[in-house]
């Protein structure tokens, strides 16, 4: 009986051991294949640069003239990312995305602005810290500095990545940079439209485009209907309900960012306004997903259609 009991628990352990061993062997073989293909890529393009201690291959195309960023700095950069088979799988350039059939309507194309530490690919983080402002580089990133053994989108496990990247700007103080963006935007808008820009105590900028015809402003617990288009200060659209159903919400229920609701409270029915919302009244230093980075001012064109 004792022997049977021992075998009862010993057999599953053997199965686990062999399963782990097979997985380990498979990982090792896939990594070997990756290194072999990477070496073929380097040789075919006469790339003789030595890798960094991490394994990253850094090739400077244009050194740039500005300063180097540190890990806690914010940067503005653009890139196109390929596999070693030259298949584009990611880019900040909408035209490149369309040409390579990877365009997505849910992506805001254009230059990225984010803290280096927030970049999710270790090889890109390292590469950015090796560049100077205005510089262009090619980063050849082995999978252990990329997505490793994970399958991501069209990328199979153990994929080496190629990034052609340009460092546009280094930002040491993102709050000061946001303030600069807002000041330039307000000055440009006021000059081009000659409309009055009201700065509220909260920091919201309110611009009335069409005065409403209603007899009251929205108050706490009022239910309002709104049409809006949300853009970044450079005009890139991140959200809109134009052409669709109205956005209905209760004032004071916390369903919107603070700057949006504050602007609606300043309007009457059938009024149209533009709101310039600093990040302190929007998504703050953290931002919102991949669409809106931290310290990002937002612009809303809004129409209030009903108060009830």
Image (cartoon, rainbow, N blue to C red):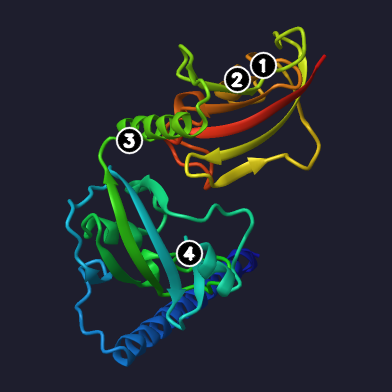
The spot of residue 268 in percent (x, y) is: 71, 15
User: Badge 2: how crowded within 10 Å, few (<14), some, or many (20+)?
Assistant: many
The mark nearer the N terminus, 2 or 4, is 4
- Residue under circle 4? 91
241 left or right of 13? right
Q: Label 2 vs label 4: CA separation?
A: 35 Å
Q: Is residue 231 above or below residue 199?
A: below
Residue 157, numbered label? none
Discs 2/4, front: 2
**Between residues 230 and 10, which one lies in front from this camera angle?**
230
Which labelled disc corresponds to residue 263?
A: 2
Q: Residue at x 51, y 28 (%)?
A: 276
| Residue visible at 23% across and 47% down in the picture | 70
Is label 1 in contact with label 2 (beta carbons under 8 Å)?
yes
In whole angstroms, how far apart are the C-alphas of marks 1 and 2? 7 Å
Q: Which residue is mark 1?
A: 267
Secondary structure of the residue carrying tag 2 is: helix
- Quarter containing the N terminus: bottom right
């Amino acid at each position: 009986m004792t022997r049977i009991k021992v075998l009862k628990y010993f057999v599953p352990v053997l199965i686990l051991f062999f399963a782990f061993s097979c997985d380990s062997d498979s990982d090792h073989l896939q990594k070997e294949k990756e290194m072999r293909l990477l070496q073929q890529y380097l040789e075919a393009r006469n790339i003789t640069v030595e890798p960094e201690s991490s394994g990253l291959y850094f090739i400077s195309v244009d050194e740039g003239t500005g300063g180097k960023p540190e890990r806690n700095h914010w940067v503005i950069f653009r890139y196109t990312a390929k596999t070693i088979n030259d298949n584009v799988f990611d880019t900040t350039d909408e035209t490149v995305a369309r040409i390579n059939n990877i365009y997505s309507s849910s992506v805001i194309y254009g230059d990225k602005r984010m803290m280096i530490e927030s970049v999710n690919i270790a090889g890109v983080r390292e590469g950015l810290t090796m560049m100077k402002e205005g510089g262009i580089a090619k980063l050849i990133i082995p999978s252990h500095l990329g997505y490793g053994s994970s399958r991501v989108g069209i990328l199979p496990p153990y994929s080496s990545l190629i990034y052609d990247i340009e460092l546009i700007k280094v930002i040491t103080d993102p709050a000061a940079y946001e303030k600069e963006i807002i000041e330039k935007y307000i000055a440009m808008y006021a000059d081009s439209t000659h409309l009055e820009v009201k700065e509220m105590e909260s920091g919201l900028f309110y611009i009335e485009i069409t005065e409403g015809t209603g007899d009251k402003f929205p108050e706490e617990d009022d239910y309002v209907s709104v049409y809006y288009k949300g853009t970044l200060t450079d005009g890139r659209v991140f959200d809109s309900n134009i052409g669709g159903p109205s956005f209905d919400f209760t004032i004071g229920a916390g369903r919107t960012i603070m700057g949006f609701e504050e602007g609606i409270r300043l309007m009457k029915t059938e009024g149209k306004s533009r709101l310039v919302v600093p990040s302190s009244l929007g998504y703050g230093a953290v931002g919102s997903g991949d669409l809106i980075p931290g310290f990002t001012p937002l612009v809303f064109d809004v129409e209030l259609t009903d108060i009830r």
